[in-house]
Image: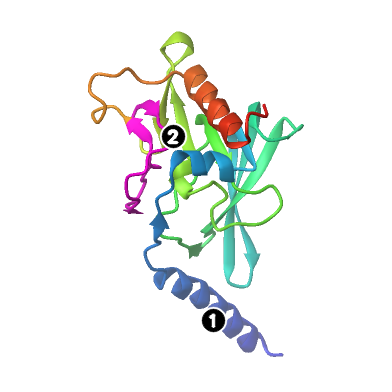
Amino acid sequence: MSLLTIRLRQLLLSLGLLLLSTLSTATTIEQMRFEQVVDTAALIFQGEVLAVESRQTGPRSISTYVQFRVDEVIKGSYAGDAIELSFLGGRVGNLQMTVSEMQVPEVGETGIYFVHSLNDSQVHPLVGWTQGHYLIKGESSAAQVTTADGQSVTALEAGNQSPLIILPHEGTARGVQVQGLNGNALPMTPGAFKARIRDIARDSSGGTP
Protein backbone atom coordinates (compact mmCIF):
# COMPACT_ATOMS: atom_id res chain seq x y z
CA MET A 1 0.00 0.00 0.00
CA SER A 2 1.47 3.35 -1.05
CA LEU A 3 2.03 6.27 1.30
CA LEU A 4 -0.42 8.30 -0.83
CA THR A 5 -3.13 5.66 -0.33
CA ILE A 6 -2.58 5.64 3.44
CA ARG A 7 -2.81 9.41 3.60
CA LEU A 8 -5.96 9.45 1.48
CA ARG A 9 -7.61 6.91 3.80
CA GLN A 10 -6.65 8.98 6.83
CA LEU A 11 -8.10 12.07 5.16
CA LEU A 12 -11.35 10.27 4.32
CA LEU A 13 -11.63 9.05 7.93
CA SER A 14 -11.19 12.59 9.21
CA LEU A 15 -13.75 13.91 6.73
CA GLY A 16 -16.15 11.14 7.73
CA LEU A 17 -16.00 12.17 11.39
CA LEU A 18 -16.47 15.83 10.51
CA LEU A 19 -19.33 14.99 8.16
CA LEU A 20 -20.99 12.93 10.88
CA SER A 21 -20.74 15.96 13.15
CA THR A 22 -22.09 18.30 10.51
CA LEU A 23 -25.07 16.09 9.79
CA SER A 24 -26.11 15.76 13.44
CA THR A 25 -29.69 16.94 13.87
CA ALA A 26 -31.49 18.39 16.87
CA THR A 27 -32.13 15.79 19.55
CA THR A 28 -35.71 15.30 20.68
CA ILE A 29 -36.06 14.69 24.42
CA GLU A 30 -39.44 13.80 25.86
CA GLN A 31 -40.25 15.26 29.26
CA MET A 32 -40.58 12.79 32.14
CA ARG A 33 -42.35 13.13 35.47
CA PHE A 34 -39.87 13.49 38.32
CA GLU A 35 -41.01 10.25 39.95
CA GLN A 36 -40.28 8.50 36.62
CA VAL A 37 -36.76 9.91 36.68
CA VAL A 38 -36.25 8.55 40.19
CA ASP A 39 -37.81 5.18 39.35
CA THR A 40 -35.82 4.75 36.11
CA ALA A 41 -32.43 5.51 37.66
CA ALA A 42 -30.34 2.48 38.57
CA LEU A 43 -28.12 4.73 40.69
CA ILE A 44 -28.57 8.19 42.17
CA PHE A 45 -25.55 9.72 43.84
CA GLN A 46 -24.07 12.98 45.05
CA GLY A 47 -20.55 13.64 43.89
CA GLU A 48 -17.98 15.88 42.24
CA VAL A 49 -16.57 15.81 38.71
CA LEU A 50 -12.86 15.00 38.88
CA ALA A 51 -11.87 14.66 35.22
CA VAL A 52 -13.30 14.89 31.68
CA GLU A 53 -11.58 13.26 28.70
CA SER A 54 -12.68 12.62 25.11
CA ARG A 55 -11.47 9.43 23.40
CA GLN A 56 -11.91 8.04 19.91
CA THR A 57 -13.83 4.81 20.42
CA GLY A 58 -14.17 3.70 16.80
CA PRO A 59 -13.47 4.76 13.20
CA ARG A 60 -16.39 7.21 13.33
CA SER A 61 -17.12 7.50 17.02
CA ILE A 62 -15.89 9.70 19.87
CA SER A 63 -17.09 9.55 23.46
CA THR A 64 -16.39 11.83 26.40
CA TYR A 65 -15.62 10.07 29.69
CA VAL A 66 -16.43 11.86 32.93
CA GLN A 67 -14.95 10.63 36.21
CA PHE A 68 -16.91 11.43 39.37
CA ARG A 69 -16.04 11.11 43.04
CA VAL A 70 -18.99 9.41 44.73
CA ASP A 71 -19.72 11.15 48.03
CA GLU A 72 -23.12 9.64 48.85
CA VAL A 73 -25.37 7.00 47.28
CA ILE A 74 -29.01 8.11 47.45
CA LYS A 75 -30.59 5.24 45.53
CA GLY A 76 -29.18 1.94 44.32
CA SER A 77 -26.15 -0.11 45.27
CA TYR A 78 -22.62 1.09 44.55
CA ALA A 79 -19.59 0.39 46.72
CA GLY A 80 -16.91 2.34 44.88
CA ASP A 81 -15.70 5.83 45.73
CA ALA A 82 -15.51 6.86 42.05
CA ILE A 83 -17.47 6.18 38.86
CA GLU A 84 -16.83 6.89 35.18
CA LEU A 85 -19.72 7.67 32.81
CA SER A 86 -19.57 7.91 29.02
CA PHE A 87 -21.29 10.65 26.96
CA LEU A 88 -21.43 10.25 23.16
CA GLY A 89 -19.50 12.92 21.27
CA GLY A 90 -16.48 15.07 21.94
CA ARG A 91 -13.26 16.29 20.37
CA VAL A 92 -9.98 14.42 19.88
CA GLY A 93 -7.31 16.47 18.14
CA ASN A 94 -8.80 17.84 14.93
CA LEU A 95 -11.68 15.36 14.98
CA GLN A 96 -15.00 16.35 16.49
CA MET A 97 -18.32 14.57 16.93
CA THR A 98 -21.26 16.67 18.09
CA VAL A 99 -24.52 15.44 19.61
CA SER A 100 -27.12 18.19 19.66
CA GLU A 101 -28.35 19.24 23.13
CA MET A 102 -25.64 17.21 24.89
CA GLN A 103 -24.52 18.83 28.16
CA VAL A 104 -21.49 17.15 29.68
CA PRO A 105 -20.74 17.75 33.39
CA GLU A 106 -17.74 20.02 33.96
CA VAL A 107 -14.63 19.48 36.05
CA GLY A 108 -15.11 20.84 39.57
CA GLU A 109 -18.90 20.84 39.61
CA THR A 110 -20.71 19.17 42.49
CA GLY A 111 -24.13 17.73 41.93
CA ILE A 112 -26.71 14.97 42.20
CA TYR A 113 -26.74 12.57 39.27
CA PHE A 114 -29.42 10.07 38.17
CA VAL A 115 -27.64 7.28 36.27
CA HIS A 116 -29.75 5.31 33.81
CA SER A 117 -27.77 2.06 33.89
CA LEU A 118 -24.55 0.67 35.33
CA ASN A 119 -24.35 -2.01 32.62
CA ASP A 120 -25.62 -0.66 29.29
CA SER A 121 -24.08 2.11 27.22
CA GLN A 122 -26.29 5.12 26.50
CA VAL A 123 -25.94 8.15 24.26
CA HIS A 124 -26.36 10.13 27.50
CA PRO A 125 -25.89 8.17 30.74
CA LEU A 126 -28.17 10.37 32.88
CA VAL A 127 -31.92 9.72 32.94
CA GLY A 128 -33.75 12.10 30.62
CA TRP A 129 -30.48 13.94 29.87
CA THR A 130 -30.67 17.22 31.86
CA GLN A 131 -33.71 15.85 33.73
CA GLY A 132 -31.28 13.67 35.69
CA HIS A 133 -28.58 16.32 36.25
CA TYR A 134 -28.71 18.73 39.22
CA LEU A 135 -26.03 21.01 40.62
CA ILE A 136 -25.17 21.98 44.18
CA LYS A 137 -24.25 25.64 44.52
CA GLY A 138 -22.84 27.35 47.60
CA GLU A 139 -21.25 26.01 50.77
CA SER A 140 -22.61 24.41 53.97
CA SER A 141 -25.76 26.16 55.26
CA ALA A 142 -26.02 28.34 52.13
CA ALA A 143 -25.91 25.39 49.71
CA GLN A 144 -28.82 24.96 47.34
CA VAL A 145 -29.80 22.66 44.48
CA THR A 146 -30.22 23.98 40.94
CA THR A 147 -31.19 22.49 37.61
CA ALA A 148 -28.45 21.83 35.06
CA ASP A 149 -28.94 25.34 33.65
CA GLY A 150 -28.68 27.01 37.07
CA GLN A 151 -32.31 27.59 38.11
CA SER A 152 -32.86 27.17 41.86
CA VAL A 153 -35.09 24.18 42.69
CA THR A 154 -37.77 25.02 45.27
CA ALA A 155 -39.87 21.84 45.35
CA LEU A 156 -40.22 18.33 43.92
CA GLU A 157 -43.78 17.26 43.19
CA ALA A 158 -44.84 13.68 42.54
CA GLY A 159 -48.10 12.72 40.88
CA ASN A 160 -48.28 15.81 38.67
CA GLN A 161 -50.53 14.69 35.81
CA SER A 162 -50.36 17.78 33.63
CA PRO A 163 -49.44 17.03 29.99
CA LEU A 164 -45.83 16.27 29.16
CA ILE A 165 -44.00 18.20 26.46
CA ILE A 166 -41.03 17.88 24.14
CA LEU A 167 -38.28 19.59 26.08
CA PRO A 168 -36.18 22.48 24.86
CA HIS A 169 -32.44 22.46 25.55
CA GLU A 170 -31.73 22.03 29.29
CA GLY A 171 -35.36 21.29 30.16
CA THR A 172 -36.47 19.88 33.50
CA ALA A 173 -38.74 17.04 34.54
CA ARG A 174 -42.42 17.61 35.26
CA GLY A 175 -42.82 18.26 38.99
CA VAL A 176 -39.51 20.10 39.44
CA GLN A 177 -40.47 23.55 40.69
CA VAL A 178 -37.96 26.36 40.19
CA GLN A 179 -37.66 29.82 41.68
CA GLY A 180 -39.83 32.29 39.82
CA LEU A 181 -42.50 29.69 39.11
CA ASN A 182 -43.24 28.93 42.75
CA GLY A 183 -43.85 32.34 44.28
CA ASN A 184 -41.38 33.28 47.00
CA ALA A 185 -40.45 29.71 47.96
CA LEU A 186 -36.88 29.24 49.16
CA PRO A 187 -34.42 27.07 47.23
CA MET A 188 -34.14 23.45 48.39
CA THR A 189 -31.05 22.48 50.33
CA PRO A 190 -29.16 19.34 49.22
CA GLY A 191 -30.43 17.57 52.34
CA ALA A 192 -34.08 18.36 51.58
CA PHE A 193 -33.62 17.43 47.92
CA LYS A 194 -32.11 14.03 48.80
CA ALA A 195 -34.77 13.33 51.43
CA ARG A 196 -37.49 13.99 48.87
CA ILE A 197 -35.83 11.62 46.39
CA ARG A 198 -35.74 8.90 49.06
CA ASP A 199 -39.42 9.49 49.88
CA ILE A 200 -40.40 9.15 46.21
CA ALA A 201 -38.23 6.03 45.77
CA ARG A 202 -39.79 4.46 48.88
CA ASP A 203 -43.33 5.23 47.70
CA SER A 204 -42.52 3.80 44.25
CA SER A 205 -41.22 0.55 45.76
CA GLY A 206 -44.30 0.09 47.96
CA GLY A 207 -42.75 1.26 51.20
CA THR A 208 -39.47 -0.66 51.00
CA PRO A 209 -36.56 1.57 52.07
22 vs 202, left or right, is left
Identify the disc placed on residue 158.
2
Q: Is residue 176 above or below residue 72?
A: below
Circle 1: residue type: Leu
What crowding class fits label 1: few (fewer than 14 Cα within 10 Å), some (14-19), or many (20 or more)?
Answer: few
Q: Which residues are magenta?
A: 151-177
Q: Quadrant of the C terminus?
A: top right
* Residue 61 location (% of width, % of height): 58, 67
Q: Nearer the viewer, residue 31 or 170?
A: 31
Question: How many other residues sit within 10 Å of disc 2, few (<14), some (14-19) or many (≥20)?
Answer: some
Image check: 198 left or right of 153?
Answer: right
- Res. 105 visible in picture: no
Q: Quadrant of residue 202?
A: top right
Q: Is residue 160 magenta?
A: yes
- Residue 167, percent across and down? 34, 52
User: Helix, strand or loop at disc 2?
Assistant: loop
Magenta: main secondary structure: loop
Camera-near label (2 vs 1) is 2
Disc 1 marks which residue? 12
Left or right relative to 17: residue 50:
right
Give the alpha-carbon distance from disc 2 to disc 1, as whole Å. 51 Å
